[in-house]
Image (cartoon, rainbow, N blue to C red):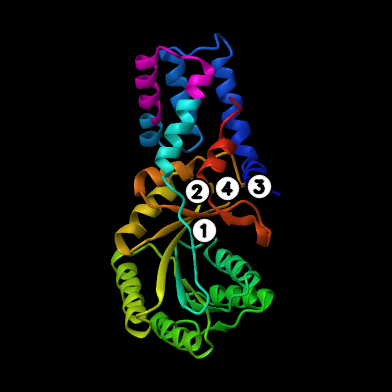
Amino acid sequence: MGLLESFRRGMKKTRDFVAEGFNRIAAAMGVFDEDMLDDLEMLLVQADVGSSAAGALIGGIRSEIRASGDASRTAVLQKLEDGMLEILGPPGRLNPQPGVLTILLMVGVNGTGKTTTAGKLCARFQSAGMKVILGAADTFRAAAIEQLAHWGERTSTPVIAHQEGSDPAAVVFDAIHAAQARRADILILDTAGRMHNKQNLMDELAKIRRIIQREAPDAKCETLLVIDATTGQNAVSQARVFREVSEVTGLVITKLDGNAKGGVALAVAFETRTPIMLAGLGENLQDLTDFEPVSFVRSLLPEK
């Protein structure tokens, strides 16, 4: 299955919602007037594109109509597609190199799919012939350690873990040294997702980063913020908080197949200006895919 088809299958609920609404708005005359553009903006907000991003997109369409005089369905769709691609920017990519340790620090609130994403990444990298180790740095919940151990068993990946309540930084220290001793290519660190105290979260993640910089100064480190698309605009709030407390280098949007609110990827990209690297389009191992902006946008909008 190609990437475009994967996105279309995974985002069917959002696509149906947006396409039906767009076609309903455009059906009367086939060209857009001011009221119809207002309706289109509201449709985008309802698809969780966010009021700021939706306003910017419709503002761009209005400017284009004034410049060209073309308010046709085709022209509006084209400008909407162009505007969405501009918001998303170029795709981010994970490009680990064999023989060079890459450390992936998974951050995000509990329940977004961090641990599941870590497990799927194990399968992805192992299928590419790389050696992977998992580190259970979420020590505040026994369930988190058990869940990561389950993914370790499922993907035949070694898991470095301590007891519940232990120091996450100590787990990171041991995981780094295990990765170095075993000449691993990838170390994936699952962290706690508490947000009740921003300062504690900031201190904890800063401590983990210091351990990484001290113990693995030559490693390439990516901090991946995992966002659950089904949480809507809460995902935008989460992204803001985690960008404040950690050096987020890429986003992972999970559960895009979960409801008709897949437009939240645009809202998060608009607010954070951080590249989206991966998309979760289902429950299976292969349903974690590289985020491709063109495929995403064409899966979101109706045919021109």
Crowdedness of circle 2 by 10 Å Cα count: few (<14), some, many (20+)?
some
Q: Is 58 colored magenta in this rendering?
A: yes
- The residue to which callout 3 is attached is 6
Q: Residue 54's quadrant in the figure?
A: top left
Eye-nearest disc, 4 or 2:
4
Eye-nearest disc, 3 or 2:
3
Eye-nearest disc, 4 or 1:
4
Look at the numbered discs 3 and 4 and tell me whether their residues touch, using CB distance below 8 Å.
Answer: no
Q: Main secondary structure of the magenta part?
A: helix
Crowdedness of circle 1 by 10 Å Cα count: few (<14), some, many (20+)?
many
Crowdedness of circle 3 by 10 Å Cα count: few (<14), some, many (20+)?
some
Q: Say above or below: 290 vs 151.
A: above
User: Which tag, 3 or 2, sits closer to the chain's start?
Assistant: 3
- The residue to which callout 4 is attached is 256
Q: Say above or below: 77 vs 157.
A: above
For marks 4 and 1, give the CA distance.
Answer: 12 Å
Look at the numbered discs 4 and 2 and tell me whether their residues touch, using CB distance below 8 Å.
Answer: no
In the rendered structure, which amino acid carries the disc numbered 2? Thr
In the rendered structure, which amino acid carries the disc numbered 1? Thr
For marks 3 and 2, give the CA distance.
Answer: 22 Å
Tell me what residue is drawn at x 50 percent, y 84 percent.
179
Look at the numbered discs 4 and 1 and tell me whether their residues touch, using CB distance below 8 Å.
Answer: no
Q: Of residues 234 and 14, which is closer to you in this image?
A: 14
Indicate left or right for 284 with 98 as reference: right
From which residue to which does the magenta span run? 57-77
User: Which tag, 3 or 1, sits closer to the chain's start?
Assistant: 3
SS at badge 4: loop
For marks 3 and 4, give the CA distance.
Answer: 11 Å
SS at badge 3: helix
Q: Position of residue 176 (x, y in %)?
A: 45, 84
For marks 3 and 1, give the CA distance.
Answer: 21 Å
Q: Which mark is residue 112?
A: 1
